[in-house]
Image (cartoon, helix red, strand yellow):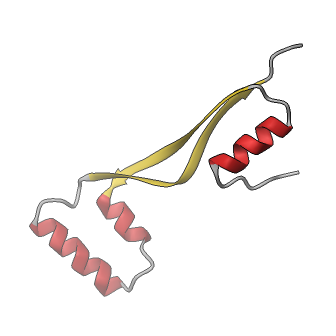
Amino acid sequence: MKEHLSSKKTIIYSLKKSKFNNFETEYIKNSYRIVYWISLLLSPKFFKSLIKKILIMHGLLNVKLAINIGNILVVAFKLKS
């Protein structure tokens, strides 16, 4: 069975329900060059090109940008009873 866990609250609930007593959760930021993030935009090509030109003018095209897009790190284990 595959479950989609999209928040820390849901993950913590599931871990407790499964009798995990030790766990840590942390949001992970994805860090990529700003040009990559622009390529992911659901915008017309001319708009993306305009943004890229502006960033080039300001020397910002290759700057890395860290964004939390929903990835969550979970480390959990059960203690033997």
**Residue at point 68% right, 29% down?**
23
**Residue at point 15% right, 66% down?**
56
Expressed as whole percent of the image width and height from the top left, the position of residue 20 reads 79, 29
Quick check: 24 left or right of 29? right
Quick check: 6 left or right of 4? left
Quick check: 3 left or right of 73? right
Q: Nearer the viewer, residue 36 or 71?
A: 71
- Residue at the extreme left of the image, as rendered: 57
Q: Which quadrant of the figure has residue 76?
A: top right
Expressed as whole percent of the image width and height from the top left, the position of residue 38 reads 35, 69
**Residue 22, above or below 63:** above
Quick check: 51 left or right of 59? right
Expressed as whole percent of the image width and height from the top left, the position of residue 45 reads 35, 83
Q: Which quadrant of the figure has residue 17?
A: top right
**Residue at point 64% right, 46% down?**
8
**Residue at point 83% right, 52% down?**
2
**Residue 52, above or below 70:** below
**Residue 38, above or below 73:** below
Expressed as whole percent of the image width and height from the top left, the position of residue 12 reads 71, 41
